[in-house]
Amino acid sequence: MTVYAFELHFSASPGEHIIDALYEAGWDDAVVAFDPDTGGEGSGHFDREAPSALQAVVSAIRQGRAAGVELLGVTEDYVSLKEIAERTGRTPAAVDHWVTGRRGPGEFPEPRVPRPRVSLYSWAEVSMWLVANGLASLSPADVEIARICEIADSTLRTRRLQQQLSAAEQQELDRAVA
């Protein structure tokens, strides 16, 4: 089995019992960051052994729900060009050439957080682009967990936002996007 590293964010009421409940539900492979005195947002930093990235993330989500916390999202890994260079063993100049299209196959993923000085890119999109174009040798597990984290985060956020709609609004939206 493979060990997958990811971070799950949650919200809970104050109390030491929250940390105990998470541990008892199965988060014994996570470092939990949560202030039991104030409650609010917390996170679990996982190194979870599982047959797949999907099973690693899904099991953590199910265990969090069983412990009674509200799940907010899974950290999608946003990276700068410098971090992309470090992860791929390339120079920042080489990565900049990919982004601008001066080198490589083109169509580098657009930044998720465009900024004038340091834009941030989705590591899931970048890693899949790199592997598809043979520009970096990344472990399949790293690519898989990045992709699953991006999808799981979007799914959790969408479900939370949908709770703000009435049942009729949810049905109408579901029909429109189906």
Image (spheres, rainbow, N blue to C red):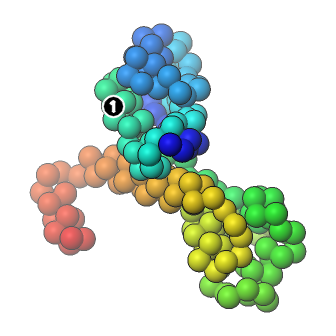
User: How far across and down, in percent of the image, does residue 82 sit?
Assistant: 81, 62
Mark 1 residue crowding within 10 angstroms, few (<14) / some (14–19) / many (20+): some
Residue topped by disc 1? 65
**Quadrant (top left/top right/bottom left/bottom right) for the C terminus:** bottom left
Give the mark count. Answer: 1
User: How far across and down, in percent of the image, does residue 171 sit?
Assistant: 14, 60
* Residue depicted at x 50% and y 22%: 28
- Whether residue 92 is visible, yes or no, is yes
Query: On the picture, is 178 further left or further right than 127?
Result: left
What amino acid is at disc 1? Answer: Arg
* Residue depicted at x 37% and y 30%: 63
Residue sitting nearer the eye, 51 or 63:
51
Query: On the picture, is 112 further left or further right than 154?
Result: right
Assign a secondary structure to mark 1: helix
- Whether residue 13 is visible, yes or no, is no
User: How far across and down, in percent of the image, does residue 150 sit?
Assistant: 49, 57
* Residue depicted at x 75% and y 59%: 87
User: How far across and down, in percent of the image, does residue 5 sit?
Assistant: 58, 42
Query: On the picture, is 117 further left or further right than 57?
Result: right
| Placement of 52 over or under 64, stated as above or below | below
Q: Residue furthest front?
A: 1
Residue sitting nearer the eye, 161 or 142:
142
Q: Quadrant of residue 141?
A: bottom right
| Placement of 11 over or under 73, stated as above or below | above
* Residue depicted at x 69% and y 58%: 79
